């Protein structure tokens, strides 16, 4: 009686030649699994010949052709490690997001702008409206807040400016903070921006005190600037108690300097200063406007002069028309 025939094994040589075949040790050492057509292959009889027979089957050929025409899911997913090219693209998208908020551009235009950048400059650029908004909120805003926190911890005294603006039915109340930085000088930054259900003195007081306490600035605050309204200051004499200025003093326990509305103060200073000048500034401004109003040659000479002295040319403001 002849001895039993030796069965073929899936060795390292076959593994290197057919990398898509994996040995199924838990079933049988002679059975391999084809990752292309997802089926088992028995190589116990003739080894490599069995594999070649499997490769010629219709099922395997169709599966191989399908794999060539499609991509794996991993190609659509981000890897854990970022290449230098990925970091460069991220830096470009972050710069684009910063440019958008720096020039107060709307997020709505980014869907179109992003496509233009892809077609003209960078095929992998993908900072459209949603992604740019996420970069601004989750990266740039967080970094700006962190830098502001560092600066405010160093500042000894600060002043605040508050105002309100209606956006349809929403009342938005920005709170600005002014402080001195030893390296950059006087800085004005946005401390907080919220929408309030109303604009009473009590609501404004709670909003301001909460923001100052959150940033540990209540005792550092020595000045307040706002519109000269009864809600903010209680009139010109500022002797009322039902206003933001009085309630902020009470919450702080120390008097706060009431600055008032800075643009109004600046405008009043200019008006009073021009009234005591020996010349009529308004008449001179009107004459300058009329000199350049409809004369193209004069305007071109003015533009050339501005270029010569390195000053930006700006169109003369219309005062009135006769």
Image (spheres, grey):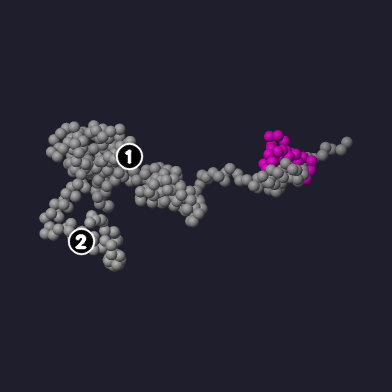
**Considering depth in this image, is 150 or 295 the residue closer to the camera?**
295
The answer to whether residue 48 shows anywhere in this view is no
Q: Callout 2: 10 Å neighbours few (<14), some, many (20+)?
A: few
Q: Which residues are magenta?
A: 21-49
**Considering depth in this image, is 289 or 90 the residue closer to the camera?**
289
Horizontal arrangement in the rendering, residue 123 relative to residue 312 (left or right): right
Question: Which mark identifies residue 204?
Answer: none
Question: What is the C-alpha distance between the residues marked 1 and 2?
Answer: 40 Å
**Residue at 48% over, 51% down:** 115
Query: In terms of image quadrants, where is residue 275?
Result: bottom left
First in sequence: mark 1 vs mark 2 = 1
Q: Is residue 48 magenta?
A: yes
Q: Give above or below for 106 relative to 282.
A: above
**Residue at 72% over, 36% down:** 28
Q: Secondary structure at mark 2?
A: helix
Mark closer to the observer (1, 2): 2
Residue that badge 1 annotates:
167
**Residue at 57% over, 44% down:** 74
Q: Position of residue 5 (x, y in %)?
A: 82, 39
Q: Is residue 34 magenta?
A: yes
Question: How many numbered badges does the structure rendering display?
Answer: 2
The answer to whether residue 17 shows anywhere in this view is yes
Q: Position of residue 257 (x, y in %)?
A: 17, 41
Q: Secondary structure at mark 1?
A: strand
Q: Position of residue 227 (x, y in %)?
A: 21, 41
Residue that badge 2 annotates:
287
Horizontal arrangement in the rendering, residue 153 relative to residue 265 (left or right): right
**Residue at 68% over, 39% down:** 38
Q: Position of residue 207 (x, y in %)?
A: 27, 35
């Amino acid at each position: 009686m002849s001895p039993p025939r030796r069965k073929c094994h899936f060795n390292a040589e076959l593994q290197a030649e057919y990398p898509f075949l994996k040995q199924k040790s838990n079933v049988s050492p002679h059975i391999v699994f084809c990752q292309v057509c997802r089926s088992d292959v028995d190589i116990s009889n003739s080894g490599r010949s069995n594999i070649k027979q499997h490769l010629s089957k219709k099922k395997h050929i169709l599966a191989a052709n399908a794999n060539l025409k499609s991509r794996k899911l991993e190609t659509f997913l981000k890897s854990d490690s970022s290449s230098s090219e990925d970091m460069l693209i991220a830096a470009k998208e972050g710069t684009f997001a910063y440019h958008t908020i720096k020039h107060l551009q709307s997020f709505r235009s980014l869907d179109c702008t992003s496509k233009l950048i892809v077609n003209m400059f960078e095929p992998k650029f993908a900072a459209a409206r949603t992604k740019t908004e996420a970069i601004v909120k989750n990266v740039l805003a967080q970094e700006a807040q962190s830098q502001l926190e560092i600066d405010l911890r160093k500042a000894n005294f600060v002043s605040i400016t508050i105002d309100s603006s209606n956006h349809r039915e929403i009342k938005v109340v920005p709170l600005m903070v002014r402080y001195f930085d030893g390296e950059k000088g006087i800085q004005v930054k946005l401390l907080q921006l919220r929408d309030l259900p109303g604009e009473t003195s009590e609501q404004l007081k709670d909003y301001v005190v909460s923001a100052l306490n959150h940033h540990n600035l209540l005792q550092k605050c020595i000045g307040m600037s706002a519109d000269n309204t009864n809600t903010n200051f209680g009139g010109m004499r500022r002797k009322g108690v039902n206003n933001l200025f009085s309630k902020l003093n009470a919450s702080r326990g120390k008097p706060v300097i009431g600055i008032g509305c800075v643009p109004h103060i600046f405008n009043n200073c200019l008006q009073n200063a021009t009234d005591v000048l020996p010349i009529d500034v308004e008449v001179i401004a009107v004459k300058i406007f009329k000199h350049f109003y409809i004369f193209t040659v004069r305007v071109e000479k003015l533009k050339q002069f501005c270029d010569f002295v390195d000053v930006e040319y700006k169109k003369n403001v219309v005062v009135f028309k006769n």
